[in-house]
Structures are given as C-alpha cells and as structure tokens.
Image (spheres, rainbow, N blue to C red):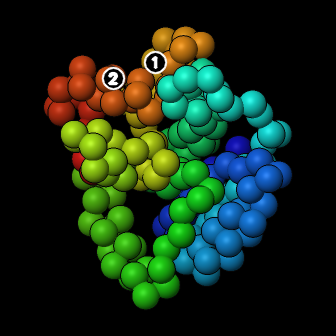
Amino acid sequence: MGNFATEDRLAWFYFYTPDYAFWHQTLATSLSNDFHVYPIPIEKFNLNEKQGHHFKGVPIKIGLVISAIQSNLGKSIIFSDCTWSINKNNLTTFQNLVSSLDKKYDFVFADNHNEQEVNIGLILIHCNDRTLAFWQSIRDEFLPDCWDQQMVNQKLGLYESAILGWNT
C-alpha cells in the first residue's frame, strides 16, 4: 500500500471479498467525492461457524490495518469494514467530527454500545509508532481461538491513556 493520505481529503481504507461486491460499490460510490477511497480486495475466507463470533480465529483485518498504518506514518486514515455507509445528509457532520478528533487521539473507534467496548469495524487512526506497535502486538499475540475485536478491547484496557490515546 502506498502513502495515500493527503491534506485535502482523508484516505479511507476498507477490505471486501467478492461476495461483498455490492457493499464495496456502495461504499466506494458514496465516499469517492469526499475521501480518497482505497478498497482492498481479498479472497473469500472461511468464517468460524462453530462457536463464538464468526470472526474468531480470523486475523485478516490485523495485517491490513498494519500495512495501512506503515504506509501512512505521520498521517491519519480511516479503516473500516465495507458494510458501512454514511447518509449524505450527515456527511458534513461526520467530516467535522473526524476533523475535530484527528490527531487529538491515536484511535477513535465506533462505539459498540456494549459495556464500553469499541467496534473495530470503523476506526480513525493517527498513523504513528504507537498505533503501529499496538496492532503489531495484536498480531503477535493472536491465537486460533481469538477474535480480533475482543483482543483489541482487552489490549486497550491494559494501556494507560497517556501511552495510547483512544476514544469512541
């Protein structure tokens, strides 16, 4: 991944599989006038259908986030799943919110409305050594029975806000 974030528009990265082509097209179309949109196509993979969350044991997003951070050190980006959409009537509100939080925190996550947990399906990331080290530690500690979002929430609970700033 190249360095994509620029001063005029924020880079928005997301990944999708072929069976999510509709969501990819919808997101790319809705964002392309206001963000630099960088879809990341990936091969279809097997989700956990046995027990727990369906992304349990699937580390794909972790590697993609690390690559996006490495390619954009010193800049801010948005990284999301492809199933998000922004109502065009709320776009300015969203952009103002992102602008007000940019560089104030290392991460701003979507609120999961679940006991203070974050949702890693939408993240504003200030790409720096701290955010890179955070995601690399998630990658290095990932186990087959782990869920990436659960690991992020556990790891965030271990960090003091002075070390890694984050918010929802």
Left/right placement of residue 106 relative to residue 73 reads left
Crowd class of label 2 (few under 14; some 14 to 19; many from 20; radius 10 Å): some
Check contact, mark 2 vs mark 1: CB within 8 A: yes
Task: State which quadrant residue 47 falls in.
Answer: top right
Q: What residue type is labelled 1?
A: Ser
The image shows residue 124 at horizontal and vertical percentages of 41, 52
What residue sits right under mark 2 in the picture? Answer: 155
What residue sits right under mark 1 in the picture? Answer: 137
Any part of residue 100 in sight: yes
The image shows residue 157 at horizontal and vertical percentages of 24, 25
Camera-nearest residue between 72 and 150:
150
Q: Which amino acid does label 2 sit on?
A: Lys
- Which quarter of the rendered picture does the N terminus lie within? top right
Residue lying at 18% horizontally and 33% vertically, measured from the top left: 161
Say which element carries label 1.
Answer: helix
- Choose mark 2 or mark 1, whichever is in front: 2
User: Which of marks 1 and 2 precedes in the sequence?
Assistant: 1
